[in-house]
Amino acid sequence: MLNLPHMLRTPDELSIKVGHGYDIHRLVEGRKLILGGIEIPFQKGPDAHSDGDVLVHALIDAILGAAGKGDIGKHFPNTPKYKNADSMKLLDYVMQLVAEREWKVTNIDATIIAEKPKLGKFVAKMKENIAKTVGIEASMVNIKAATNEGLDAIGEGRAIAAHAVVIIQLVPRSRHPFQLS
């Protein structure tokens, strides 16, 4: 057995943590397609309880996971309170939650997977929206758009998904971007 007294012994002693999130929704007629808090012109949108923003949902799960705070379903269950909820407001709540424990998101890398629509021209605005809500520079947010090369429900245009990876860092209250009461 190793006896390394210099090693960190508890998760709270870590100054950096990493989280991963994933979300997928079926695409249906008659729903708006919201990604990164912006409406994307398209004839289909996610079949979801909230606004179905897969990018923000994956990001929320990644942040909650890194902070050891469960997942999106734990904090925002499918109840009338969250019916058609604005995912950017849910993200803002999550940022307040992790800030209470002095954590700050320092980097985001996300991938949206959809056969259609093409998303390249919307990525800059998504980055801007997410960076503003999370409290970091847009240069610390990376969003990629990929297809599934015609494979499975995503490739057939019947679904949309996103993955997100975040790094959170312990930041003393005096230097935290969120003012806590």
Image: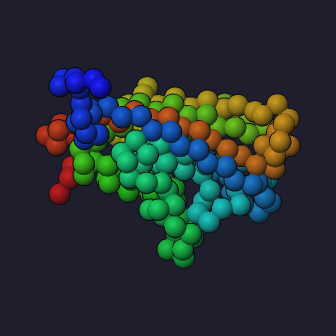
Please, is residue 173 above or below residue 29 in the view? Answer: above
Q: Is residue 152 left or right of residue 67?
A: right
**Residue 34 appears left or right of 106:** right
Depth check, front residue: 26 or 6: 6
**Residue 130 seen in the current view:** no
- Judge by depth and name the residue closer to the eye, 122 or 86: 86
Residue 112 image-quadrant placement: top right
Position of residue 97 measured from the top left corner of the image (x, y, whole percent): 32, 54
**Above or below, comparing residue 75 to residue 14 in the picture:** below
Q: Quadrant of residue 174?
A: top left
Task: Say which residue appears at 61% left-offset and 30% top-offset.
Answer: 144
Residue 3 position within the rendered picture, expressed as x and y whole percent measured from the top left: 22, 24
Image side of residue 11 versus residue 138, left or right: left
Which residue is at the front of the view, 22 or 145?
Answer: 22
Quarter that holds the C terminus: bottom left
Residue at 44% over, 62% down: 75
Tell whether 131 sits left or right of 73: left
- Quarter of the image where one finds residue 31: bottom right
Quadrant that contains the N terminus? top left
x, y percent for residue 72: 49, 56
- Give the farthest residue toward the left: 174
